[in-house]
Image (spheres, rainbow, N blue to C red):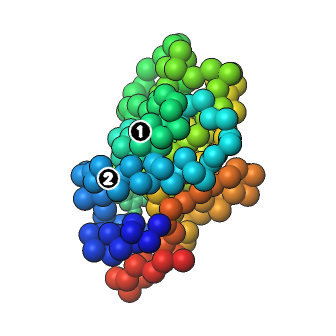
Amino acid sequence: MDILKERILQEATIVNSGVLKLDSLLNHGVDPQLTMEMGKEFARRFEGKKITKVITVESSGIPVAFATALTLGVPLVFARRKKTLLGDADAYVERVPSFTKGIVTDLIVSRHLLGAEDSVLFIDDIIANGDAARGLLKIIEQAGASVAGIGIVLEKSFQAGGKALRELGFQVETLVRISSLEGETITFE
Ligand code: 5GP
């Protein structure tokens, strides 16, 4: 999406060669109109996939996942992220490392929100190593649901997540791919 590339060039800051700060668009603030365009683009790319639910991880994935779910006319479920030692019999739980926080958290989805009848589209803001995505895929597997596809706004393709998920056979659609943040420069693929 060219408009997204322009906005990233204008508004993102490079934290280091592995991390981009994109607070005004994805991680703190939301541009509703642009977010709706992203949702429509994901709906277009996964057209005909018989999606019954969109799933994401709180909190940065929620706006674009909402826009996608609204366009597709299906419900949205967002996994809660908690730091907990307690199990929950009524929930699917997967422990994942958090890329930005440097801690391990649990992804939690209530059992009544996801079932074997679901064909799920996973939407998220950014993919780095793919840990959040892999955790969510395990939750979908636990529920006996199927994965219709994976849509990510921004793929840092110099990190392994997107490639690894494609190698597992998933349809992974990303709106913008960044191949490098070296030299304090954002390089698009
Ligand atoms: P992964 O699990 O793929 O390693 O990381 C994915 C999650 O970490 C995303 O949901 C995203 O919120 C966060 N993340 C990964 N890389 C970046 C980054 O460069 N900047 C920001 N702001 N968040 C990131």
Query: Is 59 positioned to the left or the right of 57 in the image?
Result: left
In the current view of this chain or complex, which residue is farthest to the bottom? 183
Query: Is 52 positioned to the left or the right of 185 in the image?
Result: right
The structure residue drawn at horizontal position 54% and vertical position 60%, both measured from the top left corner, is: 174
- 79, 53: nearer the viewer: 53
The structure residue drawn at horizontal position 60% and vertical position 29%, both measured from the top left corner, is: 52
Q: Is residue 124 visible?
A: no
- 75, 33: nearer the viewer: 33
How many numbered marks does the figure carry? 2
Look at label 1 and name its amino acid: Phe
Please determine whether, in this image, residue 145 is positioned above or below residue 29.
above
Please determine whether, in this image, residue 93 is positioned above or below residue 149.
above
**Comparing labels 2 and 1, the label whose residue is closer to the camera:** 2
The structure residue drawn at horizontal position 55% and vertical position 47%, both measured from the top left corner, is: 43
- 16, 125: nearer the viewer: 125
Query: Is 98 positioned to the left or the right of 45 in the image?
Result: left
Toward which corner of the image does residue 100 lie, by quadrant?
A: bottom left
Give residue 8's position: percent from left, percent from top: 34, 70
Look at label 2 and name its amino acid: Gln
Disc 2 or 1, which lies upstream in sequence?
A: 2
Please determine whether, in this image, residue 32 is positioned above or below residue 54.
below
- Is disc 2 placed on a helix, strand or loop? helix
- Is disc 1 placed on a helix, strand or loop? helix
Mark 2–mark 1 Cα distance, whole angstroms, equals: 13 Å
CB at mark 1 closer than 8 A to ligand 1?
A: no
- 177, 39: nearer the viewer: 39
Q: Which mark is residue 33?
A: 2
The quarter of the rendering in which ligand 1 is drawn is bottom left
Say few, some or many: other residues with alpha carbon within 10 Å of mark 2 (under 14 / 14 to 19 / 20 or more).
few
Q: Which residue is mark 1?
A: 66
Give residue 79's position: percent from left, percent from top: 45, 32
Give residue 83's position: percent from left, percent from top: 38, 33
